[in-house]
DNA sequence: AAAGCGTGGGG
DNA sequence: TCCCCAAGCTT
């Protein structure tokens, strides 16, 4: 077990007081000293959005969500469909569905307020080890060990931990627990993450201005970039499929809802074939959802998901047929507001360049 | 416990 | 172009 050492936290917090990033969901360290506390709802919302997602991507979504749903009660009362539409483009859509489930659970089981308790937070939908600790520390100043990708990088370098990350996590958490400042748990957590995001970066870390340089074992060894040690990543297979953009006389596009589980669950799409592992030639319009229409091949869209790449051949046709079960014609003016994931916006834009 | 689950930006 | 990766969670 690492022994308590308050020196790194003091240096880190002194650095944070002068270099904290200005973020819309954050209360600055100066305002914290005045007793201003962040709204747990905004802390939670930002933490969910920031899971595996950059600050730059999150910003506009955070503004949109807090403007439309200013409170946990408002979000709990929202239609899931509206939440999915507002989340479209941000990725990892189970986060959006869990967002509503979590809001409902807080209304039903916690009197409409986030519990100031690590285990109670951890039990909520979409909230795991990291997010529960982050909310506990940032929103409630509870002394929780907050470990995200930034912190893993900072700590493995500081202590030169060269065991693979998957094995090293308990040791990293113990180091953080021994290091954190019980007077300022929230600022300590945010300071460590800011350091990882701006100084202790994955590539070419800026060690010269780093407040922890004098005690960094990795810098001492001469190659901080060597940490953390990660497992080799698997190769990404290519899948192929076809998507069919049907357009009505008035410009409306035929849409349908995807299945409730799996990839892009619950999101909206144009009719599509399955996305298969085969790559022996091209998918034809013979698999189109409507027979007897004149199909035009618009081109091909490549989209890279987490665990496979997709080449989608896009077909276009004019049609006035009636929407089938689970389908609807979406007017051109409403297309941008649909719950369309990026891959589908690419496909539609391939057939209708002015759609968005 | 390894795999499934998105996207956009930077080097 | 390609590879890496960014405040992870769920099953």
Image (cartoon, coloured by chain):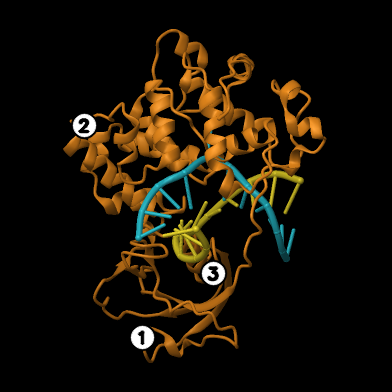
Chain colours: A orange, B yellow, C cyan
Q: Spatial distance from mark 1 to mark 3, Cα to Cα?
A: 19 Å
Of the numbered discs 3 and 2, the one sitting upstream in the chain is 2
Q: Spatial distance from mark 3 to mark 2, Cα to Cα?
A: 45 Å
Q: Which residue is mark 3?
A: A350
Residue A112, numbered label: 2
Vertical placement of A155 versus A179: above or below?
below
A107 on left or right of A273: left
Residue A53 % position (x, y): 52, 45
Residue A238 or residue A68, whichever sits in front? A238
Q: Spatial distance from mark 2 to mark 1, Cα to Cα?
A: 48 Å
Vertical placement of A161 versus A182: above or below?
below
Residue A149 or residue A40, whichever sits in front? A149
Helix or strand or loop: what does disc 3 sit on? helix
Q: Residues within 10 Å of mark 2 (few under 14, many from 20)?
A: some
Residue A72 % position (x, y): 27, 34
Residue shown at the point (57%, 30%) measured from the top left: A175
Residue A215 % position (x, y): 72, 23
Q: Residues within 10 Å of mark 3 (few under 14, many from 20)?
A: many
Residue shown at the point (26%, 77%) measured from the top left: A324
Q: Which residue is mark 1?
A: A290
Of the numbered discs 2 and 1, the one sitting upstream in the chain is 2
Residue shown at the point (36%, 46%) measured from the top left: A126
Q: Nearer the viewer, mark 2 or mark 1?
A: 2
Vertical placement of A141 versus B1: above or below?
above
Residue B2 or residue A251, whichever sits in front? B2
């Amino acid at each position: 077990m690492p022994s308590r050492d308050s020196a790194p936290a003091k240096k880190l917090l002194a650095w944070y007081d002068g270099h904290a990033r200005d973020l819309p969901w954050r209360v600055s360290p100066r305002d914290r000293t005045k007793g201003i506390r962040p709204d747990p709802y905004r802390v939670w919302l930002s933490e969910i959005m920031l899971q595996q997602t950059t600050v730059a991507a999150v910003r506009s979504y955070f503004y949109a969500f807090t403007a439309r749903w200013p409170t946990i009660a408002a979000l709990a009362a929202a239609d899931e469909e509206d939440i999915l539409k507002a989340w479209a483009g941000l990725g990892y859509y189970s986060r959006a569905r869990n967002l509503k489930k979590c809001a409902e659970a807080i209304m039903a089981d916690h009197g409409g307020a986030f519990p100031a308790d690590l285990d109670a937070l951890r039990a909520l939908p979409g909230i795991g080890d990291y997010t529960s600790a982050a909310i506990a520390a940032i929103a409630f100043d509870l002394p929780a060990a907050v470990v995200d990708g930034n912190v893993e990088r900072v700590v493995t370098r500081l202590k030169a931990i060269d065991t693979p990350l998957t094995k090293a996590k308990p040791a990293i958490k113990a180091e953080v627990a021994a290091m954190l400042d019980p007077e300022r748990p929230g600022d300590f957590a945010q300071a460590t993450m800011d350091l990882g995001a701006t100084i202790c970066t994955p590539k070419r870390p800026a060690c010269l201005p780093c407040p922890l340089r004098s005690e960094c074992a990795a810098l001492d060894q001469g190659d901080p970039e060597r940490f953390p040690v990660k497992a080799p990543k698997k190769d990404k297979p290519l899948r192929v499929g076809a998507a069919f953009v049907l357009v009505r006389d008035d410009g409306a596009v035929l849409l349908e809802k995807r299945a409730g589980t799996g990839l892009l669950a619950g999101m909206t799409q144009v009719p599509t074939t399955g996305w298969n592992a085969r790559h022996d030639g091209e998918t034809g319009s013979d698999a189109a959802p409507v027979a007897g229409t004149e199909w035009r091949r618009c081109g091909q869209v490549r989209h890279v998901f987490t665990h496979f790449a997709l080449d989608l051949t896009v077909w276009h046709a004019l049609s006035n047929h009636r929407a089938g079960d689970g389908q609807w014609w979406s007017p051109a003016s409403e297309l941008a507001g649909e719950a369309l994931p990026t891959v589908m916006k690419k496909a539609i834009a391939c057939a209708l360049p002015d759609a968005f």
